Amino acid sequence: MRRSLTDVIFMSEKRKNLLLLLKNGPRKMDEILEILDVTRHAILPQIKILSENGLMVKTKDICRLTEIGEIIVEDMLPLMGTISVLEGNHQYWTEHDISPVPLHLLKRIRELHSCHILEPDLNDMFELNKQLVENALGSSSIMGATSFLHPAFPSFLLDLVEKGIDVLIIMSEPALKKHIQDYQHELEVFLGSKRGKLFVYPDDLKLASLFITDQFLMMCLFDRSGNYDRKDLVFCNEAALKWGSELFEYYLLRSQPIIEL
């Protein structure tokens, strides 16, 4: 019985890796063996399967993709990128509410690449994330959104603007009311600076927090029960920073500026 193309491509790491290698052009057998770190005996059966299914051809000692192979490999990369991001922290993605991320960005979630999860220990529960503070203070600008009040947040904002760092912050309506109630003076100083800008998101923000500095994207989602578990996803690559900036812009366009309290 003929194999499905899905099986041909994904049921063998050797076949998958060979297709990806050939995406950049034809390769000699010796190059394939060296780059994939396989023996000729191990790779020849996989070449035979890929050739029989019309995905590649081997002429003498040269292997290359067919036109069909090129089409398929071009579409493999986005799928594998998406799987890699979701598989890396599968439990987090499945247990948290991803609805705050608009569909057009969810479809590009592969751009986030690898990440790690920051979870504070019990001794740091009432402190801002140390990595966020250190990176923010070393940045030229910071963009952030939050749905809750952290007692250290207002003084942190003042530290940023006093150091000449441009800060754009979006708050949910409940978070803004709580900040005004408990830290009105600090917010007034923040707004009175040339560096601080504050916005309110009029609808249900649903996003626990989002911060983009020059060096990383930090994002926290509520779990599927709506609880905040203080588990932050941290991404430290250029593509993730761009993705995070677009997520911030999505909410910024739907927010209203706060000129005075």
Image (tube, helix red, strand yellow):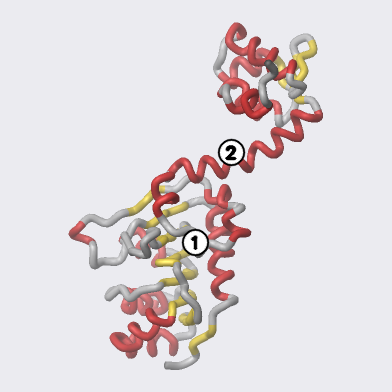
Number of other residues with Cα within 10 Å of mark 1, as a class: few under 14, some 14 to 19, many 20 or more: some
Q: Secondary structure at mark 2?
A: helix
- On the rendered image, what quadrant is the C terminus found in? bottom left
Q: Is residue 118 above or below residue 207?
A: above
Q: Residue at x 57, y 55 (%)?
A: 106
Say whether marks 1 and 2 touch (CB < 8 Å).
Answer: no
The residue that mark 1 highlights is 214
Q: Residue at x 47, y 75 (%)?
A: 204
Quadrant of the rendered image containing residue 67: top right
Q: Position of residue 247 (x, y in %)?
A: 55, 64
Residue type at the position of mark 2: Met
Q: Secondary structure at mark 1?
A: loop
Q: Position of residue 92 (x, y in %)?
A: 40, 50
Q: Position of residue 49 (x, y in %)?
A: 68, 16
Q: Earlier in the sequence, mark 1 or mark 2?
A: 2
Label 1 vs label 2: CA separation? Answer: 27 Å
The residue that mark 2 highlights is 80
